[in-house]
């Protein structure tokens, strides 16, 4: 006889940040501060004729859009499930993260084009203005990164915001140094050269985020979960002789689901077994939604391919 168990208990799921409350305020502050700063950088970059400032402003503008999309998706994820969207709208966080990663690299391509043009046609740069605005950027980006520090390990959306802000802060440090070098040496080519470095830093630092969001969009198991370890864990449960049809996928950037069939001859105390299993999956692997079917024996043919595993 088969038993189905659907784990919906989120009472202990506090590893990720909330979608509202403090992080809603963090999104608000981050968006407002960065919009004001972007406006200042664009004005200063045009006045100082600085490719580095303009490239940094372009990236900061993409961060504003990223923050807005991530915030909207996190709010959408709190909506209750419907008859059609039975998991709710949690998947919006994955789509937003993927879109943010794509927009970031699109912005990098545009900035690269502008930087090459500045390198081919160098013009005098106002070093003091560059240093002043980039110094302000250190404060703005550093403060915004600090707002997201608590949740950056539990949600790829929040981690994206945190890494972008932290990267921008470090890049602003580089712009300050570059502005000083241009001011004291007069080497105008240093400004676009520093812009190239900024592009490289942002591109490399964002690659992991892009890779992870693509994986999540394809319903790959989250990188934080070792599927082989989960399978070994299931096989170690009392009475379990085989695991098949094991699937682990992300419901959102914070929530993970699991389905599996466990061969457990006799299936005694099935309800108690399933309750304890759900609890352990939640606390050992942060899998918040589990659906497990218990079976007395293998299905007919028993052919489920490479994913079958049994106790030796």
Image: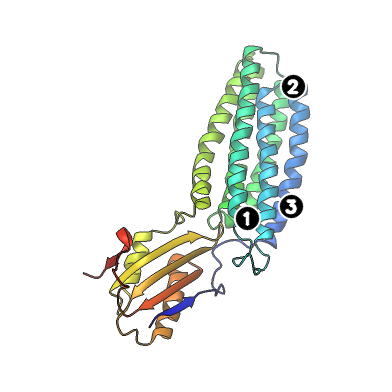
Quadrant location of the N terminus in the rendered image: bottom left
Q: Is residue 97 above or below residue 17?
A: above
Seen from the viewer's position, the closer of residues 202 and 246 is: 246
Query: Which label sits in the foreground, 2 or 3?
Result: 3
Compared to residue 56, the image places residue 78 above or below, namely below
**Rounded to the nearest whole Å, what is the CA distance between mark 3 and mark 1?**
19 Å
Q: Residues within 10 Å of mark 3 (few under 14, many from 20)?
A: some
Q: Which numbered marker is on residue 28?
A: 3
Any mark on residue 61, and which? Answer: none
Residue at the far bottom in the pictured view: 269
Image coordinates of residue 53 in percent, x first then y, are 68, 28
Q: Which residue is mark 2?
A: 48
Q: Nearer the viewer, residue 295 or 170?
A: 295
Please tell me whether mark 2 sits on a helix, a strand or a loop. helix
Screen quadrant of the C terminus: bottom left
Calculate the distance from the C-alpha at mark 1 to the C-alpha at mark 2.
40 Å
């Amino acid at each position: 006889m088969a038993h189905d168990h659907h784990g919906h208990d989120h009472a202990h799921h506090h590893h990720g940040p909330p979608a509202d409350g403090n992080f809603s305020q963090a999104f608000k502050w981050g968006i407002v501060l960065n919009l004001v700063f972007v406006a200042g950088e664009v004005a200063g970059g045009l006045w100082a004729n600085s490719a580095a400032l303009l490239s940094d402003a372009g990236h900061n503008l993409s961060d504003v859009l990223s923050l807005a999309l991530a915030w909207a998706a996190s709010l959408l994820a709190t909506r209750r499930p419907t008859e059609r969207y039975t998991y709710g709208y949690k998947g919006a966080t994955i789509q937003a993260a993927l879109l943010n990663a794509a927009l970031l690299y699109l912005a990098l391509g545009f900035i690269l084009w502008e930087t090459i043009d500045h390198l081919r046609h160098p013009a005098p740069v106002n070093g003091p203005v560059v240093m002043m605005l980039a110094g302000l950027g250190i404060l703005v980006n550093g403060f915004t990164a600090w707002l997201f520090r608590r949740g950056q390990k539990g949600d790829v959306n929040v981690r994206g915001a945190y890494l972008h802000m932290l990267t921008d802060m470090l890049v602003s440090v580089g712009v300050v140094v570059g502005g000083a070098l241009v001011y004291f040496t007069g080497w105008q080519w240093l400004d676009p050269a520093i812009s190239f470095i900024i592009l490289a830093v942002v591109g490399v630092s964002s690659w992991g985020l892009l890779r992870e969001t693509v994986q999540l969009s394809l319903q790959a198991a989250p990188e934080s979960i070792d599927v082989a370890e989960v399978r070994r864990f299931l096989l170690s449960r009392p009475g379990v002789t085989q695991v098949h049809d094991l699937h682990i996928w992300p419901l959102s950037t914070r929530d993970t689901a699991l389905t599996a069939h466990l061969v457990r001859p006799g299936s005694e105390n099935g309800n108690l077994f399933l309750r304890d299993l759900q609890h352990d999956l939640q606390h050992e692997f942060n899998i918040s939604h589990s659906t497990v079917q218990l079976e007395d024996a293998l299905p007919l043919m028993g052919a489920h391919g490479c994913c079958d595993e049994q106790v030796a």
